[in-house]
Image: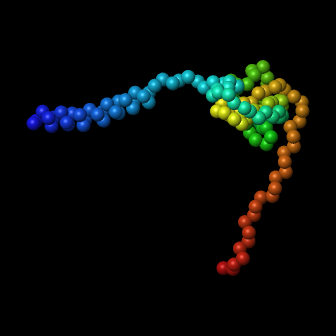
Amino acid sequence: MRDRGHNTQMRLLLVPLFACFAIATIGCRNDSQSPPPATELIGGPCQYSEKTAIAVVSDADQEQVRFLINESVVPYSREDLPSDYDYSPGKRFRVTEKRITEGTCTPYILTVDGPTDALAPEPRKRAKGWKFPEPTWKY
C-alpha cells in the first residue's frame, strides 16, 4: 500500500515539474533573427495602394529618420533607407508610400525616390477646437 501512495505522490509532483520545464524550454528558444527589411514583401500575394508625396525630415538620430508626410510623422529605420542621402532636418525627399489593401504582407513600405526642391503641401487649416459650453445653472 505504501508503494502505491508513494507512486501517486511522485506522479503528482513530477507532472507539474515536467510541464514547467517544457514551458521554460519552449519559451527560451533562440529566435534571434532580425525581421526582414520593410522593403521585403513577406506573407504571400498582396496588393498595395501607392501614393507619391513630399517628405520633410523633421528630425533624425543614428537609428531612425522621422519624416513629416502629409501632416503625419513617419519614423523609419536608417537601415531601410538609401545611405547615400543626407537626412538632416529640413531636407526634402520625393517618396512613394505603399499601404497594404489586401493580404498579409508588410503593411507599410516607404521608398525614398530621391531628394527634391519641391515644397511640401501647406498643412490644412484645422477647425477651431471644441469649447466646453458655459454652464446654464447658477451656484
Does residue 106 appear anywhere in the picture?
A: no
> What x and y, as percent, mark residue 61?
70, 30
Viewer-closest of 133 and 28: 28
* Quarter the C terminus occupies: bottom right
Choose top left, top right, bottom left or bottom right for residue 119. Answer: top right
Image side of residue 28 versus residue 55, left or right: left
For image coordinates 82% across by 33% down, the residue present is: 52
Give percent across and percent down for residue 120: 86, 37
Point out the residue furthest to the right here.
Answer: 118
Give the left or right position of residue 13, taking residue 63 as reference.
Answer: left
Left or right: 62 in relation to 90: left
Residue drawn at (78%, 27%) of the image: 112
Viewer-closest of 33 and 93: 33
The image quadrant that residue 42 belongs to is: top right
Q: Give the residue displayed 67% in from the left and 26% down from the top.
A: 41
Q: Whole-percent x and y of residue 122?
A: 87, 43
